[in-house]
Image (cartoon, rainbow, N blue to C red):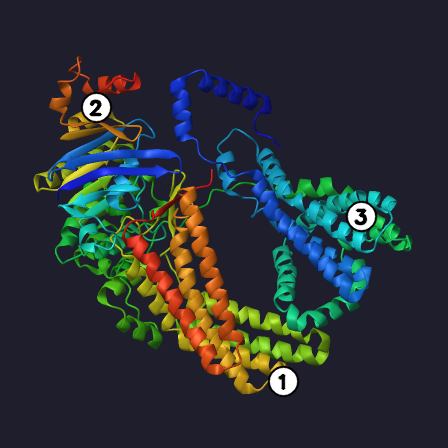
Amino acid sequence: MKIEVRGVLKTYRSLRALDFVSLEIEPGQIVGVLGANGAGKTTLLRCLAGIAAPDKGEVLFDGEPFRRDRLDMRSRLYTMPDFPFFFWEHSIVRNLAMILRVYDADSPGNETRVLQLLRDFDLLPLALRRVQSLSRGQIYKAGLVAMIAADRDVWLLDEPFASGMDPHGIDMFKQYALEAVRRGRTVIYTTQLLDIAERFSDRLCLLDAGEVRAFDSLENLRMRVHDKGNVLEELFRQLREGGST
Amino acid sequence: MKLYAPEFEKALKQGIRHAIHSDAKLQKEYRRAKGRRRPIWAFYMSRLVFSCMLAASVSTVLNLTNHPETALAVVVLWTLAAASFLSALLAPSRLHGSDVRALQLLPVSDFTIYLFRRDKILGFHSMVLLDMLVGLGTLAFLLALPWPSWLGLPVIAGLAWVFNVALAMFVAAKFPRFRTGWLASGVTLLFVAWLIGNRYDGPQMIAALDFAAPTLNLVLPTGWPLDFFHFLAGGSCWPPILGLVPIAYIIWSYQNCERLVSGRFTYQEPSVALESSEQVPEALVQAGAQAGRPVGVTAITEGILSRDCFVLPYWDEDWVQRILWRWLTPREQILANFVFPKPLTMIRPWGRIMRHLLIATVVWQIMRILIPSMENIVLIFAMMVPLLEVLNQSWPAGAAFRTVRTFGIRISLLAPYPVAFQEISNLLLKCTVIQLPAVAAIVTCLSLTYAASHSLPWLNGLLMGLRVTLLLMALRLALLVLNFGSMSNDTSRSWQRTLVALFVCIFEICLFVGLAALALFIPAEPWAWLSGVSLVGTQYGFLCFYGWLWNRGSIDLMSMDAR
């Protein structure tokens, strides 16, 4: 699904979280959104997910303006906030069952995939535990299982690499995300971990004070800096020093 | 109790301010991030409304009875509610506020945490001192006391407040099982009942209060220090002086009582049950039990592969539920499981409400024989309890409006999922409409009881019951908008929006109150019904309008915490 963000302005009272942001994201890519704290990364994800309403501008999916009552459009997205939204008093399996049903993704045959995902993320022995009894990393993994099992066109993830997941969980997420991108899915995630972003993204979006300072592939960004081994670090240094990227 | 160094904080703030002012870039950043703060005086101003309500009550009671004793009893009852409320807050289980969890991580003792919490609670309780000053001041003004007497008012109010705190601590320490919260709620309900039923039952209630006032002032502990007011008004000084003995004892025992209360305060981590057995197929559980082992990975695997774990509850508990289930569209059935993870029970709660209504009616009949002057007060209570139960049962919301807090922002639980406004509102409205006959039955019973108690024709009672049912339906629609709005920052995004929202709210309230008044009080039946139907129609229109705003993305599905 092609995503277009056209001149989106989003303010929280006097704070401009997004300052007329425009982007175009082709399907089948992993896009890393980077920026300092308060740069507007999470707000951008929320605008894409329809949680936050832009003050101006619009978000288009496959050329059509996004509306909250367009369930066909909304069900092509899956949003993972920094902490998965679950019913805490219920088990992982019950939560998965409810979420997959809302996405109409609980058709016969998908249970094998769910089982495989639970195994891969080391959640199978915990599948009947209440969500509230799990650790932060385990809850995030359960959220990823729901996301991967739902298999939507666009995956929106807020800070997946700072979610408390263990190295194995992170590795599994990367494998599944890469496999999904090969099938034409789009993965958009925010992060502060520059080395992961450099290795894991097809395109990188640098936000600063609500403005897009760069949106390009790593190769093209490399052309803009002197230190070719630490592209993002140098770009961030330039941003802090007030230079243009 | 301060867990920080005020001097350090002051110096730090000054340093930050200086650093920001000396750097243009930081200044720009500061202005960008700066938000409006909710002023602290706003809280005190809103709390002042309660003090004014007390003053108004004192004034009304004195005007109607001309007995200062009775007006003083109003202040006594008010402070009794305050002391009960404070005592309930001092119970060890209630001392576990959200900040206690954070404080527990610091290297401080339980006693220090207790002191921090106690000071916070007492800080809020300090407003009761203002209540006393306002209440006694109103009484002194209406009795035209000479100015030297006014000098004694702060002393009496101060003594009464100190005693109030000591009394609350005494009860919390010596009678920890005593339901002080219930007492506070009872007295508050009494005030509410008086406010609501003032038109019909005010005189009887005031007569009852007038009759009981001397006893109340003598028997209720909160009356002992306030009795000194008679001394200022030129009354006998002996009864208040006699009261000094228990007052001194309770104040003297404060330290011991506090030691008891703080000794019981030990923080315990909240614990949860690990296993959730709802998805485990019964056969697997039995097999596990026979083999003497818990449900293991093999059983879970079998449960998932057989799809038993994916079977969500089918609403089949009673015949009303079955009708509702058939009425819901397949998509609404899915959402019903999502919004109500536990199926919504239907018949059982209505049976319970009916039982409560019967009990309340019997109690009312007994009371009208035993104490005829209390008949109307009991009737109001008797009607209020089932009515609140009716509203609770017929206006279910489940998890539809539940929010998740992440770093200062509350986001609706359903916001990230593909769920439409109309779907949620339709589901909730169907849950209400299916219970409408039961609502009408209970409300009509209440209305008929009221008509019988006031010797009104039964037909009037019947029609009034049906009109009230219509009103409740309209109220449900209006509250749905408020429920959706509660998850959003639609009233706080900018001052222009706040202004527009305020205007719409005032218009909506005026429209609602106007049409509801016509529907309830207009004698001509056709016009009353027309008003009632218009009320429901306008509220439905309002809901649709809000839904339109929601769909076109004019409203955020999240709200920010107050700064």
Dot 1: within a 10 Å radius of its alpha carbon, few (fewer than 14), some, or many (20 or more) residues? few
B454 sits left or right of A51 in the view: right
Residue to which mark 1 is pinned: B455
A139 sits left or right of B63 in the view: left
Q: For mark 2, name the chain.
A: A
The amino acid marked with disc number 3 is Ile
Q: Residue at x 23, y 24 (%)?
A: A194
Dot 3: within a 10 Å radius of its alpha carbon, few (fewer than 14), some, or many (20 or more) residues? many
Residue to which mark 2 is pinned: A195
Q: Give the position of the N terminus of chain A as an image quadrant.
A: top left
Work out whether residue A51 or residue A170 is closer to the camera in this orientation and state it. A51
Residue to which mark 3 is pinned: B247
Above or below, B486 relative to B534: above
A161 sits left or right of B88 in the view: left
User: Mark 2 to mark 1: distance in Å?
Assistant: 83 Å
Q: Position of residue B79 (x, y in %)?
A: 70, 53
The amino acid marked with disc number 1 is Ser
- Disc 2 versus disc 1: nearer the observer: 1
Contact (Cβ within 8 Å) of mark 2 with mark 1: no
Q: For mark 1, name the chain.
A: B
Q: Are marks 2 and 1 on the same chain?
A: no
User: Mark 3 to mark 1: distance in Å?
Assistant: 48 Å
